[in-house]
Amino acid sequence: MKSICLLFLLIPAFTFAASQKYLANVEKKLDSLFSTEIPDTAVLKAVRIVTEDDSLSSEETEHFYAKKIFPFIEKKKANVSHLMLAVAYRSRALTVSKFGEIEEHRKYMEMAYNHILKVGDTGYQELRQKGAVCYSYASMQLFFGDIAKAHKVFYQAIRAAEKIKDYNKVMESFYALAIYYTQVKDTQRLDNILADIREVFRKADGDVPPRAYYSWYSVATARYALDTDRPEMRDSALLYSRKSLDIVEKYGPELERGTANFAWNYYNHALFFIEKPYVNEDSASYYLEKARRVPQRLAMHAREVELNVRCAYATLYKSQGLYPKAIRVFKDALRMMDADTINNGIRQERLDAYENIVSMDSALGNYKEALAYQQKIIDYHQKVYDSELARQLDEISTKFGVEKKNLELQNLKEREEQRTVILRLLIGSLVAAVVILVFVVWIYILHRRRLQDRLYQSALESEMNLQELETVKSQYSDLKDSLESRQVLRNFEVAVEKMKSVVMAARLDPAVRDEYIQKLSTLNLVAFERQFATSISRMTQMDIKYILCFYLEFEARDIATIFSVEPASVYTVRYRLRKKFRDNPSFQFLMK
Protein backbone atom coordinates (compact mmCIF):
# COMPACT_ATOMS: atom_id res chain seq x y z
CA MET A 1 0.00 0.00 0.00
CA LYS A 2 2.85 2.36 0.81
CA SER A 3 4.45 1.67 -2.57
CA ILE A 4 1.23 2.56 -4.38
CA CYS A 5 0.91 5.83 -2.47
CA LEU A 6 4.53 6.65 -3.22
CA LEU A 7 3.96 6.00 -6.89
CA PHE A 8 1.04 8.44 -6.96
CA LEU A 9 3.17 11.04 -5.21
CA LEU A 10 5.98 10.68 -7.75
CA ILE A 11 3.77 10.97 -10.83
CA PRO A 12 3.32 14.79 -10.56
CA ALA A 13 7.06 15.22 -10.03
CA PHE A 14 7.88 13.15 -13.12
CA THR A 15 5.28 15.07 -15.11
CA PHE A 16 6.73 18.41 -14.03
CA ALA A 17 10.24 17.28 -14.87
CA ALA A 18 9.15 16.14 -18.30
CA SER A 19 7.44 19.49 -18.87
CA GLN A 20 10.54 21.38 -17.83
CA LYS A 21 12.67 19.22 -20.11
CA TYR A 22 10.34 19.93 -23.02
CA LEU A 23 10.46 23.67 -22.32
CA ALA A 24 14.26 23.46 -22.25
CA ASN A 25 14.21 21.76 -25.67
CA VAL A 26 12.00 24.53 -27.07
CA GLU A 27 14.37 27.12 -25.62
CA LYS A 28 17.33 25.39 -27.29
CA LYS A 29 15.51 25.42 -30.63
CA LEU A 30 14.91 29.15 -30.30
CA ASP A 31 18.53 29.85 -29.33
CA SER A 32 19.73 27.82 -32.32
CA LEU A 33 17.43 29.78 -34.65
CA PHE A 34 18.56 33.14 -33.32
CA SER A 35 22.24 32.24 -33.71
CA THR A 36 22.09 30.74 -37.23
CA GLU A 37 19.24 32.33 -39.19
CA ILE A 38 18.88 35.84 -40.55
CA PRO A 39 16.61 37.99 -38.31
CA ASP A 40 13.44 37.86 -40.46
CA THR A 41 13.59 34.09 -40.92
CA ALA A 42 14.47 33.54 -37.26
CA VAL A 43 11.47 35.59 -36.05
CA LEU A 44 9.02 33.83 -38.39
CA LYS A 45 10.23 30.34 -37.45
CA ALA A 46 10.29 31.19 -33.74
CA VAL A 47 6.69 32.45 -33.82
CA ARG A 48 5.60 29.25 -35.58
CA ILE A 49 7.41 27.08 -33.01
CA VAL A 50 5.69 28.64 -29.97
CA THR A 51 2.22 29.13 -31.51
CA GLU A 52 1.78 25.86 -33.42
CA ASP A 53 2.99 23.64 -30.58
CA ASP A 54 -0.15 22.32 -28.83
CA SER A 55 2.01 21.09 -25.93
CA LEU A 56 2.61 24.68 -24.79
CA SER A 57 0.02 26.52 -22.72
CA SER A 58 -0.81 30.15 -23.44
CA GLU A 59 1.22 31.21 -20.39
CA GLU A 60 4.25 29.22 -21.57
CA THR A 61 3.94 30.67 -25.06
CA GLU A 62 3.85 34.19 -23.58
CA HIS A 63 6.91 33.30 -21.48
CA PHE A 64 8.90 32.51 -24.64
CA TYR A 65 7.66 35.71 -26.26
CA ALA A 66 8.74 37.80 -23.26
CA LYS A 67 12.07 36.08 -22.51
CA LYS A 68 13.33 34.99 -25.91
CA ILE A 69 11.58 36.23 -29.05
CA PHE A 70 11.00 39.90 -28.24
CA PRO A 71 14.41 40.50 -26.63
CA PHE A 72 15.89 39.15 -29.88
CA ILE A 73 13.58 41.45 -31.89
CA GLU A 74 14.61 44.44 -29.78
CA LYS A 75 18.28 43.60 -30.28
CA LYS A 76 17.94 43.11 -34.07
CA LYS A 77 15.13 45.60 -34.65
CA ALA A 78 17.04 47.46 -37.37
CA ASN A 79 17.29 44.22 -39.38
CA VAL A 80 13.72 42.93 -38.80
CA SER A 81 11.17 43.94 -41.44
CA HIS A 82 7.86 45.62 -40.62
CA LEU A 83 6.10 42.50 -41.93
CA MET A 84 7.78 40.20 -39.41
CA LEU A 85 7.25 42.73 -36.60
CA ALA A 86 3.53 42.81 -37.43
CA VAL A 87 3.36 39.00 -37.45
CA ALA A 88 5.14 38.75 -34.08
CA TYR A 89 3.03 41.43 -32.36
CA ARG A 90 -0.25 39.94 -33.68
CA SER A 91 0.68 36.45 -32.51
CA ARG A 92 1.60 37.76 -29.07
CA ALA A 93 -1.65 39.76 -28.87
CA LEU A 94 -3.72 36.66 -29.66
CA THR A 95 -1.73 34.71 -27.06
CA VAL A 96 -2.28 37.16 -24.17
CA SER A 97 -5.98 37.49 -25.05
CA LYS A 98 -6.45 33.81 -24.22
CA PHE A 99 -5.82 34.45 -20.52
CA GLY A 100 -7.71 37.74 -20.28
CA GLU A 101 -4.93 40.34 -20.62
CA ILE A 102 -7.12 42.84 -22.48
CA GLU A 103 -4.82 45.84 -22.19
CA GLU A 104 -1.78 43.84 -23.29
CA HIS A 105 -3.82 42.42 -26.17
CA ARG A 106 -4.77 45.92 -27.24
CA LYS A 107 -1.21 47.25 -26.96
CA TYR A 108 0.30 44.48 -29.09
CA MET A 109 -2.48 44.68 -31.70
CA GLU A 110 -1.91 48.44 -32.02
CA MET A 111 1.78 47.78 -32.67
CA ALA A 112 0.99 45.01 -35.16
CA TYR A 113 -1.41 47.29 -37.05
CA ASN A 114 1.05 50.21 -37.10
CA HIS A 115 3.78 47.97 -38.55
CA ILE A 116 1.52 46.31 -41.14
CA LEU A 117 0.53 49.74 -42.49
CA LYS A 118 4.19 50.25 -43.42
CA VAL A 119 4.23 47.07 -45.51
CA GLY A 120 3.64 47.42 -49.25
CA ASP A 121 1.08 45.44 -51.27
CA THR A 122 3.80 43.80 -53.36
CA GLY A 123 3.63 40.07 -52.63
CA TYR A 124 1.43 37.19 -51.59
CA GLN A 125 2.83 36.92 -48.04
CA GLU A 126 2.59 40.67 -47.47
CA LEU A 127 -1.08 40.75 -48.53
CA ARG A 128 -1.91 37.54 -46.63
CA GLN A 129 -0.45 38.85 -43.39
CA LYS A 130 -2.00 42.28 -43.94
CA GLY A 131 -5.41 40.65 -44.25
CA ALA A 132 -4.85 38.61 -41.06
CA VAL A 133 -3.55 41.54 -38.99
CA CYS A 134 -6.29 43.92 -40.15
CA TYR A 135 -8.97 41.30 -39.43
CA SER A 136 -7.70 40.77 -35.87
CA TYR A 137 -7.29 44.51 -35.26
CA ALA A 138 -10.79 45.28 -36.58
CA SER A 139 -12.28 42.52 -34.40
CA MET A 140 -10.58 44.13 -31.39
CA GLN A 141 -11.98 47.56 -32.29
CA LEU A 142 -15.44 46.01 -32.64
CA PHE A 143 -15.06 44.54 -29.15
CA PHE A 144 -14.10 47.94 -27.70
CA GLY A 145 -17.01 49.65 -29.48
CA ASP A 146 -15.11 51.76 -32.04
CA ILE A 147 -17.41 50.78 -34.91
CA ALA A 148 -16.17 53.40 -37.39
CA LYS A 149 -12.55 52.28 -37.08
CA ALA A 150 -13.56 48.60 -37.11
CA HIS A 151 -15.54 49.16 -40.32
CA LYS A 152 -12.59 50.91 -41.98
CA VAL A 153 -10.03 48.25 -40.97
CA PHE A 154 -12.30 45.32 -41.88
CA TYR A 155 -12.44 46.77 -45.39
CA GLN A 156 -8.62 47.01 -45.42
CA ALA A 157 -8.55 43.30 -44.60
CA ILE A 158 -11.12 42.64 -47.35
CA ARG A 159 -9.11 44.50 -50.00
CA ALA A 160 -5.86 42.74 -49.04
CA ALA A 161 -7.50 39.28 -49.07
CA GLU A 162 -9.30 40.02 -52.33
CA LYS A 163 -6.02 40.77 -54.11
CA ILE A 164 -4.73 37.26 -53.37
CA LYS A 165 -8.17 35.72 -53.94
CA ASP A 166 -8.53 34.53 -50.36
CA TYR A 167 -12.31 34.75 -50.49
CA ASN A 168 -12.76 32.88 -47.20
CA LYS A 169 -10.93 35.69 -45.41
CA VAL A 170 -12.92 38.25 -47.42
CA MET A 171 -16.19 36.74 -46.29
CA GLU A 172 -15.02 36.36 -42.67
CA SER A 173 -14.57 40.13 -42.54
CA PHE A 174 -17.96 40.81 -44.17
CA TYR A 175 -19.57 38.28 -41.83
CA ALA A 176 -18.09 39.88 -38.69
CA LEU A 177 -19.39 43.29 -39.76
CA ALA A 178 -22.78 41.85 -40.68
CA ILE A 179 -23.20 40.22 -37.24
CA TYR A 180 -22.81 43.60 -35.54
CA TYR A 181 -25.09 45.47 -37.95
CA THR A 182 -27.71 42.73 -37.58
CA GLN A 183 -27.65 43.11 -33.79
CA VAL A 184 -28.24 46.88 -34.06
CA LYS A 185 -30.68 46.36 -37.00
CA ASP A 186 -28.77 48.73 -39.31
CA THR A 187 -30.37 47.63 -42.57
CA GLN A 188 -28.66 50.34 -44.60
CA ARG A 189 -25.19 49.09 -43.68
CA LEU A 190 -26.28 45.49 -44.29
CA ASP A 191 -27.55 46.44 -47.76
CA ASN A 192 -24.18 48.07 -48.50
CA ILE A 193 -22.34 44.96 -47.32
CA LEU A 194 -24.51 42.72 -49.53
CA ALA A 195 -23.83 45.01 -52.51
CA ASP A 196 -20.09 44.80 -51.85
CA ILE A 197 -20.29 41.00 -51.51
CA ARG A 198 -22.06 40.71 -54.87
CA GLU A 199 -19.37 42.90 -56.46
CA VAL A 200 -16.60 40.70 -55.04
CA PHE A 201 -18.31 37.56 -56.36
CA ARG A 202 -18.81 39.20 -59.75
CA LYS A 203 -15.10 39.98 -60.03
CA ALA A 204 -14.21 36.47 -58.84
CA ASP A 205 -16.17 35.05 -61.79
CA GLY A 206 -17.19 31.87 -59.98
CA ASP A 207 -13.74 31.09 -58.52
CA VAL A 208 -15.08 31.16 -54.96
CA PRO A 209 -14.90 28.35 -52.33
CA PRO A 210 -18.13 26.98 -50.79
CA ARG A 211 -17.39 28.49 -47.37
CA ALA A 212 -17.47 31.97 -48.92
CA TYR A 213 -20.87 31.24 -50.48
CA TYR A 214 -22.06 29.95 -47.11
CA SER A 215 -21.05 33.25 -45.44
CA TRP A 216 -22.76 35.27 -48.19
CA TYR A 217 -26.04 33.38 -47.86
CA SER A 218 -25.92 33.65 -44.06
CA VAL A 219 -25.46 37.44 -44.24
CA ALA A 220 -28.31 37.75 -46.76
CA THR A 221 -30.59 35.62 -44.57
CA ALA A 222 -29.89 37.77 -41.51
CA ARG A 223 -30.50 40.98 -43.48
CA TYR A 224 -33.86 40.02 -45.02
CA ALA A 225 -35.10 38.38 -41.81
CA LEU A 226 -35.06 41.82 -40.15
CA ASP A 227 -38.04 42.94 -42.27
CA THR A 228 -40.45 40.13 -41.30
CA ASP A 229 -43.46 42.41 -41.77
CA ARG A 230 -42.81 42.50 -45.53
CA PRO A 231 -43.68 39.20 -47.28
CA GLU A 232 -41.23 39.75 -50.13
CA MET A 233 -38.34 40.20 -47.67
CA ARG A 234 -39.40 37.05 -45.80
CA ASP A 235 -39.35 35.14 -49.09
CA SER A 236 -35.82 36.44 -49.80
CA ALA A 237 -34.65 35.46 -46.31
CA LEU A 238 -36.23 31.99 -46.75
CA LEU A 239 -34.52 31.60 -50.16
CA TYR A 240 -31.03 32.47 -48.87
CA SER A 241 -31.54 30.33 -45.77
CA ARG A 242 -32.36 27.38 -48.01
CA LYS A 243 -29.28 28.14 -50.15
CA SER A 244 -27.05 28.12 -47.07
CA LEU A 245 -28.54 24.73 -46.08
CA ASP A 246 -27.81 23.40 -49.56
CA ILE A 247 -24.17 24.44 -49.11
CA VAL A 248 -24.08 22.79 -45.67
CA GLU A 249 -25.52 19.52 -46.94
CA LYS A 250 -23.27 19.44 -50.00
CA TYR A 251 -19.96 20.61 -48.49
CA GLY A 252 -20.43 19.85 -44.79
CA PRO A 253 -17.04 18.20 -44.08
CA GLU A 254 -15.18 21.01 -45.83
CA LEU A 255 -17.09 23.70 -43.93
CA GLU A 256 -16.53 22.00 -40.57
CA ARG A 257 -12.89 23.13 -40.65
CA GLY A 258 -14.17 26.65 -39.98
CA THR A 259 -16.12 28.09 -37.07
CA ALA A 260 -19.63 27.51 -38.48
CA ASN A 261 -22.22 25.67 -36.37
CA PHE A 262 -24.68 24.10 -38.80
CA ALA A 263 -27.26 23.50 -36.08
CA TRP A 264 -28.10 27.18 -36.12
CA ASN A 265 -28.70 27.11 -39.89
CA TYR A 266 -31.35 24.43 -39.43
CA TYR A 267 -32.74 26.18 -36.34
CA ASN A 268 -33.01 29.58 -38.07
CA HIS A 269 -34.68 27.96 -41.08
CA ALA A 270 -37.23 26.30 -38.80
CA LEU A 271 -38.18 29.69 -37.32
CA PHE A 272 -39.78 30.64 -40.65
CA PHE A 273 -42.49 28.02 -40.01
CA ILE A 274 -43.41 28.46 -36.32
CA GLU A 275 -45.20 31.80 -36.23
CA LYS A 276 -48.50 32.93 -37.70
CA PRO A 277 -49.53 33.13 -40.45
CA TYR A 278 -46.82 30.79 -41.80
CA VAL A 279 -47.18 27.94 -39.29
CA ASN A 280 -46.12 24.55 -40.74
CA GLU A 281 -45.51 21.91 -38.10
CA ASP A 282 -43.97 19.38 -40.49
CA SER A 283 -41.38 21.78 -41.89
CA ALA A 284 -40.59 23.28 -38.47
CA SER A 285 -40.21 19.84 -36.85
CA TYR A 286 -38.08 18.55 -39.75
CA TYR A 287 -35.51 21.33 -39.44
CA LEU A 288 -35.55 21.45 -35.62
CA GLU A 289 -34.79 17.75 -35.47
CA LYS A 290 -31.97 18.20 -37.98
CA ALA A 291 -30.58 20.93 -35.74
CA ARG A 292 -30.65 18.50 -32.81
CA ARG A 293 -28.77 15.83 -34.77
CA VAL A 294 -25.81 18.07 -35.71
CA PRO A 295 -22.79 16.91 -33.63
CA GLN A 296 -21.40 19.59 -31.31
CA ARG A 297 -17.76 19.95 -30.29
CA LEU A 298 -18.59 21.16 -26.78
CA ALA A 299 -21.31 20.09 -24.34
CA MET A 300 -22.26 23.73 -23.70
CA HIS A 301 -23.01 24.18 -27.41
CA ALA A 302 -25.17 21.04 -27.49
CA ARG A 303 -27.04 22.28 -24.41
CA GLU A 304 -27.63 25.71 -25.96
CA VAL A 305 -28.95 24.14 -29.19
CA GLU A 306 -31.29 21.83 -27.25
CA LEU A 307 -32.58 24.72 -25.18
CA ASN A 308 -33.39 26.84 -28.24
CA VAL A 309 -34.99 23.90 -30.04
CA ARG A 310 -37.33 23.29 -27.09
CA CYS A 311 -38.28 26.96 -26.98
CA ALA A 312 -38.95 26.87 -30.72
CA TYR A 313 -41.24 23.81 -30.29
CA ALA A 314 -43.08 25.60 -27.50
CA THR A 315 -43.55 28.68 -29.71
CA LEU A 316 -44.85 26.40 -32.50
CA TYR A 317 -47.43 24.82 -30.14
CA LYS A 318 -48.49 28.27 -28.97
CA SER A 319 -48.99 29.37 -32.59
CA GLN A 320 -51.18 26.26 -33.09
CA GLY A 321 -53.25 27.13 -30.01
CA LEU A 322 -51.96 24.13 -28.02
CA TYR A 323 -51.40 26.18 -24.89
CA PRO A 324 -51.07 23.41 -22.26
CA LYS A 325 -48.53 21.57 -24.40
CA ALA A 326 -46.66 24.80 -25.10
CA ILE A 327 -46.58 25.68 -21.38
CA ARG A 328 -45.23 22.23 -20.54
CA VAL A 329 -42.43 22.48 -23.11
CA PHE A 330 -41.55 26.01 -21.96
CA LYS A 331 -41.29 24.76 -18.38
CA ASP A 332 -39.05 21.90 -19.56
CA ALA A 333 -36.80 24.50 -21.19
CA LEU A 334 -36.81 26.62 -18.03
CA ARG A 335 -35.62 23.65 -16.02
CA MET A 336 -32.59 23.48 -18.32
CA MET A 337 -31.72 27.09 -17.67
CA ASP A 338 -29.67 28.35 -14.79
CA ALA A 339 -29.45 31.85 -13.37
CA ASP A 340 -27.04 32.97 -16.05
CA THR A 341 -27.17 36.78 -16.35
CA ILE A 342 -24.09 37.00 -18.53
CA ASN A 343 -25.16 35.00 -21.58
CA ASN A 344 -27.59 37.25 -23.45
CA GLY A 345 -29.06 34.34 -25.40
CA ILE A 346 -30.09 32.37 -22.29
CA ARG A 347 -31.31 35.55 -20.60
CA GLN A 348 -33.57 36.42 -23.50
CA GLU A 349 -34.87 32.86 -23.85
CA ARG A 350 -35.73 32.78 -20.13
CA LEU A 351 -37.66 36.06 -20.33
CA ASP A 352 -39.42 34.93 -23.51
CA ALA A 353 -40.46 31.71 -21.77
CA TYR A 354 -41.81 33.59 -18.74
CA GLU A 355 -43.75 36.06 -20.90
CA ASN A 356 -45.21 33.30 -23.10
CA ILE A 357 -46.32 31.29 -20.03
CA VAL A 358 -47.93 34.42 -18.52
CA SER A 359 -49.81 35.18 -21.74
CA MET A 360 -51.01 31.57 -22.22
CA ASP A 361 -52.02 31.08 -18.54
CA SER A 362 -53.94 34.34 -18.72
CA ALA A 363 -55.70 33.12 -21.86
CA LEU A 364 -56.53 29.84 -20.12
CA GLY A 365 -57.77 31.63 -16.99
CA ASN A 366 -54.90 30.35 -14.79
CA TYR A 367 -54.40 33.78 -13.24
CA LYS A 368 -52.66 32.50 -10.13
CA GLU A 369 -50.08 30.70 -12.26
CA ALA A 370 -49.79 33.74 -14.50
CA LEU A 371 -49.23 35.98 -11.48
CA ALA A 372 -46.50 33.69 -10.19
CA TYR A 373 -44.61 33.84 -13.47
CA GLN A 374 -45.18 37.57 -13.73
CA GLN A 375 -43.46 37.89 -10.35
CA LYS A 376 -40.61 35.73 -11.69
CA ILE A 377 -40.27 38.19 -14.57
CA ILE A 378 -40.03 41.07 -12.09
CA ASP A 379 -37.52 39.21 -9.91
CA TYR A 380 -35.48 38.20 -12.90
CA HIS A 381 -35.44 41.76 -14.22
CA GLN A 382 -34.20 42.92 -10.81
CA LYS A 383 -31.51 40.25 -10.81
CA VAL A 384 -30.50 41.15 -14.34
CA TYR A 385 -30.52 44.83 -13.38
CA ASP A 386 -28.16 44.19 -10.46
CA SER A 387 -25.91 42.08 -12.65
CA GLU A 388 -26.07 44.64 -15.45
CA LEU A 389 -25.23 47.42 -13.01
CA ALA A 390 -22.18 45.50 -11.79
CA ARG A 391 -21.21 44.77 -15.38
CA GLN A 392 -21.59 48.43 -16.34
CA LEU A 393 -19.40 49.45 -13.42
CA ASP A 394 -16.80 46.96 -14.61
CA GLU A 395 -17.15 48.31 -18.13
CA ILE A 396 -16.75 51.87 -16.89
CA SER A 397 -13.61 50.86 -15.04
CA THR A 398 -12.34 49.03 -18.12
CA LYS A 399 -13.20 51.95 -20.38
CA PHE A 400 -11.42 54.32 -18.04
CA GLY A 401 -8.34 52.13 -18.28
CA VAL A 402 -8.78 51.96 -22.04
CA GLU A 403 -9.19 55.72 -22.34
CA LYS A 404 -6.12 56.21 -20.20
CA LYS A 405 -4.22 53.84 -22.42
CA ASN A 406 -5.60 55.61 -25.49
CA LEU A 407 -4.37 58.93 -24.19
CA GLU A 408 -0.95 57.43 -23.53
CA LEU A 409 -0.89 55.93 -27.01
CA GLN A 410 -2.09 59.24 -28.47
CA ASN A 411 0.63 61.15 -26.63
CA LEU A 412 3.16 58.60 -27.80
CA LYS A 413 1.86 58.94 -31.35
CA GLU A 414 1.99 62.74 -31.17
CA ARG A 415 5.56 62.63 -29.92
CA GLU A 416 6.37 60.22 -32.71
CA GLU A 417 4.74 62.59 -35.21
CA GLN A 418 6.70 65.52 -33.78
CA ARG A 419 9.93 63.57 -34.15
CA THR A 420 8.89 62.67 -37.68
CA VAL A 421 8.17 66.34 -38.50
CA ILE A 422 11.51 67.44 -37.05
CA LEU A 423 13.28 64.70 -38.98
CA ARG A 424 11.51 65.71 -42.18
CA LEU A 425 12.43 69.35 -41.61
CA LEU A 426 16.05 68.39 -41.05
CA ILE A 427 16.03 66.22 -44.15
CA GLY A 428 14.29 69.00 -46.10
CA SER A 429 16.86 71.54 -44.92
CA LEU A 430 19.67 69.18 -45.85
CA VAL A 431 18.15 68.57 -49.28
CA ALA A 432 17.67 72.33 -49.78
CA ALA A 433 21.28 72.96 -48.77
CA VAL A 434 22.46 70.28 -51.18
CA VAL A 435 20.32 71.77 -53.97
CA ILE A 436 21.68 75.25 -53.26
CA LEU A 437 25.23 73.92 -53.18
CA VAL A 438 24.70 72.10 -56.47
CA PHE A 439 23.23 75.27 -57.97
CA VAL A 440 26.20 77.36 -56.77
CA VAL A 441 28.65 74.77 -58.13
CA TRP A 442 26.76 74.74 -61.42
CA ILE A 443 26.91 78.57 -61.62
CA TYR A 444 30.61 78.42 -60.73
CA ILE A 445 31.31 75.83 -63.42
CA LEU A 446 29.30 77.82 -65.96
CA HIS A 447 31.11 81.03 -65.03
CA ARG A 448 34.43 79.22 -65.14
CA ARG A 449 33.70 77.90 -68.60
CA ARG A 450 32.85 81.41 -69.78
CA LEU A 451 36.08 82.72 -68.30
CA GLN A 452 37.99 79.89 -69.95
CA ASP A 453 36.40 80.80 -73.30
CA ARG A 454 37.36 84.41 -72.81
CA LEU A 455 40.86 83.47 -71.77
CA TYR A 456 41.13 81.21 -74.78
CA GLN A 457 40.06 84.06 -77.06
CA SER A 458 42.50 86.39 -75.33
CA ALA A 459 45.22 83.78 -75.69
CA LEU A 460 44.49 83.51 -79.39
CA GLU A 461 44.66 87.28 -79.76
CA SER A 462 47.83 87.61 -77.71
CA GLU A 463 49.52 84.70 -79.48
CA MET A 464 49.64 86.74 -82.67
CA ASN A 465 51.64 89.45 -80.86
CA LEU A 466 53.80 87.02 -78.93
CA GLN A 467 56.74 87.11 -81.33
CA GLU A 468 56.74 90.91 -81.42
CA LEU A 469 56.55 91.04 -77.64
CA GLU A 470 59.34 88.49 -77.32
CA THR A 471 61.47 90.51 -79.72
CA VAL A 472 60.81 93.76 -77.86
CA LYS A 473 61.45 92.03 -74.56
CA SER A 474 64.75 90.63 -75.81
CA GLN A 475 65.85 94.02 -77.08
CA TYR A 476 64.73 95.68 -73.87
CA SER A 477 66.54 93.06 -71.78
CA ASP A 478 69.76 93.44 -73.73
CA LEU A 479 69.59 97.20 -73.48
CA LYS A 480 68.78 97.05 -69.78
CA ASP A 481 71.61 94.65 -69.09
CA SER A 482 74.00 96.84 -71.02
CA LEU A 483 72.90 99.96 -69.15
CA GLU A 484 72.97 98.23 -65.79
CA SER A 485 76.41 96.81 -66.52
CA ARG A 486 77.73 100.20 -67.49
CA GLN A 487 76.13 101.82 -64.45
CA VAL A 488 77.52 99.21 -62.08
CA LEU A 489 80.91 99.43 -63.66
CA ARG A 490 80.76 103.22 -63.38
CA ASN A 491 79.73 102.95 -59.73
CA PHE A 492 82.64 100.68 -58.96
CA GLU A 493 85.05 103.00 -60.85
CA VAL A 494 83.78 105.95 -58.82
CA ALA A 495 84.06 103.93 -55.62
CA VAL A 496 87.65 102.90 -56.44
CA GLU A 497 88.69 106.48 -57.22
CA LYS A 498 87.14 107.71 -54.01
CA MET A 499 88.88 104.96 -52.07
CA LYS A 500 92.21 105.97 -53.60
CA SER A 501 91.64 109.54 -52.44
CA VAL A 502 90.62 108.39 -48.98
CA VAL A 503 93.63 106.09 -48.66
CA MET A 504 96.00 108.84 -49.84
CA ALA A 505 94.56 111.19 -47.24
CA ALA A 506 94.67 108.64 -44.44
CA ARG A 507 97.48 108.61 -41.86
CA LEU A 508 98.97 105.31 -42.89
CA ASP A 509 102.46 104.03 -43.10
CA PRO A 510 103.77 105.11 -46.54
CA ALA A 511 104.65 101.57 -47.50
CA VAL A 512 101.17 100.32 -46.51
CA ARG A 513 99.57 103.24 -48.30
CA ASP A 514 101.44 102.46 -51.48
CA GLU A 515 100.50 98.78 -51.23
CA TYR A 516 96.79 99.65 -50.87
CA ILE A 517 96.96 102.17 -53.75
CA GLN A 518 98.63 99.48 -55.86
CA LYS A 519 95.82 96.97 -55.11
CA LEU A 520 93.13 99.51 -55.95
CA SER A 521 94.83 100.40 -59.19
CA THR A 522 95.31 96.84 -60.35
CA LEU A 523 91.74 95.73 -59.46
CA ASN A 524 89.92 94.09 -62.42
CA LEU A 525 86.73 96.11 -62.35
CA VAL A 526 84.98 93.97 -64.98
CA ALA A 527 85.51 90.76 -63.00
CA PHE A 528 84.60 92.61 -59.79
CA GLU A 529 81.37 93.89 -61.39
CA ARG A 530 80.39 90.40 -62.62
CA GLN A 531 80.99 88.91 -59.16
CA PHE A 532 78.82 91.45 -57.35
CA ALA A 533 76.35 92.46 -60.11
CA THR A 534 73.44 90.52 -58.55
CA SER A 535 73.88 92.18 -55.17
CA ILE A 536 74.66 95.75 -56.18
CA SER A 537 71.06 96.85 -55.63
CA ARG A 538 71.35 95.89 -51.95
CA MET A 539 74.66 97.76 -51.38
CA THR A 540 74.98 101.29 -50.11
CA GLN A 541 77.96 103.47 -51.03
CA MET A 542 79.58 102.74 -47.71
CA ASP A 543 78.91 99.01 -48.20
CA ILE A 544 80.81 99.18 -51.50
CA LYS A 545 83.74 100.94 -49.85
CA TYR A 546 83.94 98.43 -46.98
CA ILE A 547 83.50 95.49 -49.39
CA LEU A 548 86.43 96.84 -51.49
CA CYS A 549 88.57 96.95 -48.39
CA PHE A 550 87.60 93.44 -47.25
CA TYR A 551 87.90 92.08 -50.79
CA LEU A 552 91.43 93.54 -51.17
CA GLU A 553 92.31 92.19 -47.71
CA PHE A 554 93.02 95.52 -45.97
CA GLU A 555 93.92 95.19 -42.29
CA ALA A 556 91.09 96.03 -39.85
CA ARG A 557 93.17 98.67 -38.01
CA ASP A 558 94.07 100.28 -41.34
CA ILE A 559 90.41 100.26 -42.43
CA ALA A 560 89.55 101.97 -39.08
CA THR A 561 92.26 104.58 -39.77
CA ILE A 562 91.05 105.12 -43.34
CA PHE A 563 87.44 105.72 -42.26
CA SER A 564 88.39 107.40 -38.98
CA VAL A 565 86.45 104.86 -36.85
CA GLU A 566 87.26 102.50 -34.07
CA PRO A 567 88.52 98.99 -35.03
CA ALA A 568 85.51 97.52 -33.25
CA SER A 569 83.25 99.36 -35.67
CA VAL A 570 85.06 97.69 -38.55
CA TYR A 571 84.35 94.28 -37.08
CA THR A 572 80.73 95.27 -36.56
CA VAL A 573 80.41 96.30 -40.23
CA ARG A 574 82.07 93.02 -41.30
CA TYR A 575 79.56 91.04 -39.15
CA ARG A 576 76.67 93.03 -40.58
CA LEU A 577 77.77 92.37 -44.16
CA ARG A 578 78.25 88.67 -43.43
CA LYS A 579 74.71 88.42 -42.09
CA LYS A 580 73.31 90.44 -44.97
CA PHE A 581 74.97 88.41 -47.74
CA ARG A 582 75.43 85.03 -46.07
CA ASP A 583 73.43 83.21 -48.75
CA ASN A 584 75.44 84.71 -51.65
CA PRO A 585 78.50 82.63 -52.61
CA SER A 586 80.20 85.78 -53.98
CA PHE A 587 80.78 86.96 -50.41
CA GLN A 588 82.66 83.90 -49.15
CA PHE A 589 85.71 86.13 -48.55
CA LEU A 590 83.77 87.76 -45.69
CA MET A 591 83.39 84.41 -43.94
CA LYS A 592 87.18 83.92 -43.42
Image (cartoon, grey):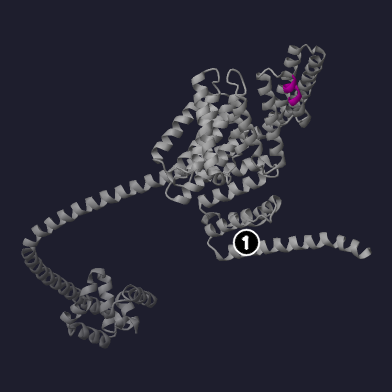
Q: Is residue 255 above or below residue 472?
A: above
Q: Which residues are magenta?
A: 324-329
Q: Is residue 40 above or below residue 114?
A: below
Is residue 326 covered in magenta? yes
Q: Is residue 382 left or right of residue 539?
A: right
Q: Quadrant of residue 484?
A: bottom left
Magenta region, main secondary structure: helix
Q: Which residue is mark 1?
A: 30
- The residue sitting at the front extreme is 282
Q: Nearer the viewer, residue 94 or 246?
A: 246
Q: Position of residue 117 (x, y in %)?
A: 49, 43
Q: Is residue 407 above or below residue 474?
A: above
Q: Nearer the viewer, residue 475 or 369?
A: 369
Q: Position of residue 86 (x, y in %)?
A: 55, 48
Indicate the quadrant containing the C terminus: top left, top right, bottom left or bottom right: bottom left
Indicate the quadrant containing the N terminus: top left, top right, bottom left or bottom right: bottom right
Q: Using the rendered image of the protein, determine whether residue 21 is visible from the camera's viewpoint.
A: yes
Q: Nearer the viewer, residue 571 or 222?
A: 222
Tell me which amino acid carries mark 1: Leu
Q: Is residue 578 left or right of residue 113?
A: left
